[in-house]
Image (spheres, grey):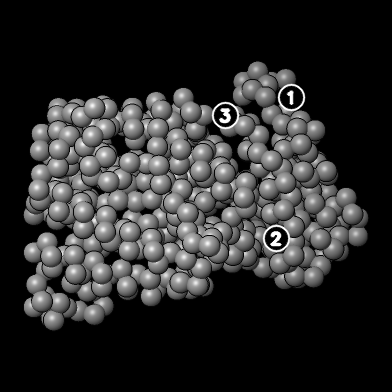
Amino acid sequence: MNVRYSQIDRSLFIDNRKRLAARLPKNAVAIVHSADEFPKNGDGNHTFYQSSDLFWLSGIDQEKSIVVIAPDATREAHREILFVRETNEEIAIWEGHKYTKDEARATSGIETVYWTHEFERVMHELILRSEHICLSLNENIRADVETEYRDLRELRKLQLRYPLHTYHRLGPIFDDLRSVKHSVEIELMQQACNITDAAFRRVLKFVKPGVWEHEIEAEIIHEFIRSRSAGHAYNPIIASGANSCVLHYNANNQQCKDGDIILFDFGAEYAHYVSDMSRCVPVNGKFTPRQRAVYDAVLDVMKFAQSMLKPGTVYAEYEKEIGRYMQGKLVDLNLLTQHDIDKQDPKWPAYKRYFMHGTSHFLGLDVHDVGNRDHAMQAGQVFSCEPGIYIREENLGIRLENDILLTRNGNIDLMENIPLEAEEIETLMNS
């Protein structure tokens, strides 16, 4: 229980559990475990980071926690259960404070709280009186997980002990529910964006020829931590010169040279909610004509894409339209010809040589958050908007990215206050 952020209104978690309970089969029990504490080397562990599903249901930010939801349980007290790790004097001395039962109730809004070591005893009767067991595995479509983790281990134990129950996936339900944000979640994401804004303005004053990428990274994390963020929402990209054309570059170990561009891709996490921003700035504070032309082209594509982010838009069609629009910009920049377009492979259009990634992804508790791209976009969802042009032969990569909330009355740019126009960036760098 090592948190910096202010306590979140537990109405968020109460509402989230109601939404999940309404989607469960009749006479079902849903079980969601906390994340593992992953070993590092020797006797060390990586910093604990809570399971997004468990946090979404409870706000509990501690290892060895379990949330159980059984809407049809005979005992009303067992329709929602929270299990937390029991502390003792030795744990308090070595690790610090852990949740008391009262603190766990106050955080989550779950009245029935047991110690984690009581899980099997408490759950045996509840499971035997249920027909369905619903579990959450990591089914993020981008995930490639080789490590065995707690939810997977617990599934195997349950299947051995209760082989005649019917097992169900919670993943598709979380895809639907977590992708549509509660007003409290939007406030937390906005705070993450505000912290990212402060960090970007800080580095605009810091960047100059000769500075090192890792020095810039240090300025960013300084601003994040002083603002009560746990740190980066993902590995930050501080990519100068040719590095700006490497999509997931994060070595951040090169010196920034006069005349080069720096591509920034970083975002603060606040209370587990993330932000995701990309910006490009000239090392010397002034874009060259070519840099400016490419920058303005990407900015124009970004504005076009943002206009399409609205309820009812189908993701696949959205990406196709942006590709067609981008193609025209690449012709204007003399990067593509009509001949290139005429002979292109429809499965890999010509524009993909310079813009090879998608324009948008879901955002929330994770940077590549859960959500179903086969469903039309909905009000309450938050998407990144991040077109880019990468010209390797010119050592020039430009990507611009903001976080966009969809509403019934148009979209809201959660990063509208972060400098974006080229003139504003130059002015701030030279002020």
Q: Element under label 1? A: loop
Q: Which residue is identified by label 1?
A: 88
Q: Residue at x 42, y 59 (%)?
A: 361
Q: Residue at x 25, y 63 (%)?
A: 356
Residue 341 x %, y %: 15, 77
Q: Is residue 248 left or right of residue 254?
A: right
Tag 2: amino acid: Leu
Residue 262 can be seen, yes or no: no
* Quarter of the picture holding the C terminus: top left
Q: Residues within 10 Å of mark 2 (few under 14, many from 20)?
A: some
Residue 146 x %, y %: 45, 55
Q: Which mark is residue 20?
A: 2
Tag 1: amino acid: Asn
**Marks 2 and 3, the one that precedes in the sequence:** 3
**18 above or below 289?**
below
Residue 331 can be seen, yes or no: yes
